[in-house]
Image: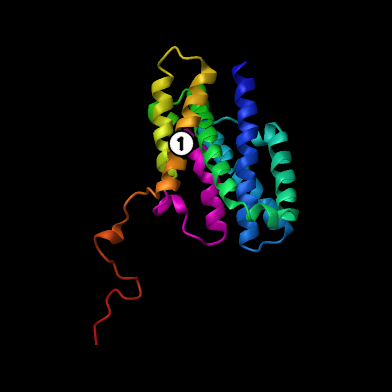
Amino acid sequence: MDSTIMYIFDLLGTCVFAITGAVRGVRHKLDFLGVVVFACTVGVGGGVFRDVLLGATPVAAYEHESYLIVCIVTGVLVFFLAPQIVGRWHLVAIGDAIGLGVFTALGAAKGLMYGAGPIGIVLSGVFSAVVGGVLRDVMVRVVPAVLTSDFYATASLIGGLLYVLLSKTTLPFALQIIVTAITVTTIRLLAMRFKIHLPVARYWVEIPDDMDVGKKKR
């Protein structure tokens, strides 16, 4: 029963993340293959990375072809329906927040299933939720949003910590997943609504670029 619940939620999260990845590919003017690759990268990239670290091989995306099929179909649909989807970017952002919550909860749960300690459980959730997006940004030479001021990985981190606490209770597994996912999603949506983000170093000090280091002022 637990594995069935995880599988259903995982497919949901994969679909949502694949949509956001494909849309980002469209916004960067990638061709058909590029959009589909972005959909797959964001859809399953985090899960693959997590499974490799946990030693869960073959990784879920390869063991169950449904994950890649969902990503490919999603990428194709987004490619042809891009104008309608990009015009509703706020809905895509909401879907991304939902995917963040789902992947954080499921990633943390899988970490627990494979015997990870508290820190490993938290990291399993974070990696599941953010690695796909990091790979996407790196592929188009953009500094990953999770490394700058975006309150994204932080929401996932909080969710991972929450799941660790919930796993110590007698709460049914499904409710542990749902509560964690809803919490992360809510935090992310509130962060977007009120523009909450972590402070960055430039607020306190301006560090010169590498090209400026060592140069004398004229």
Q: Given the image, on which type of amino acid does mark 1 rest? A: Thr
Q: Where is residue 95 in the image (x, y as percent from the top left)?
A: 58, 42
Residue drawn at x 43%, y 26% is: 163
Foreground of the two, 166 or 194: 194
39 with respect to 126 (left or right): right
Q: Main secondary structure of the magenta part?
A: helix
Location of mark 1 (residue): 186
| Relative to 205, residue 135 above or below | above
Query: Looking at the rendering, which quadrant does residue 49 occupy?
Result: top right
| Relative to 121, residue 196 above or below | below
* Crowd around label 1: few <14 · some 14–19 · many ≥20 (10 Å): some
Q: Is residue 146 visible?
A: yes
Q: Where is residue 181 in the image (x, y as percent from the top left)?
A: 50, 31
| Relative to 25, residue 17 above or below | above
Residue drawn at x 55%, y 36% is: 52
Where does the magenta region start and end?
Answer: 123-150
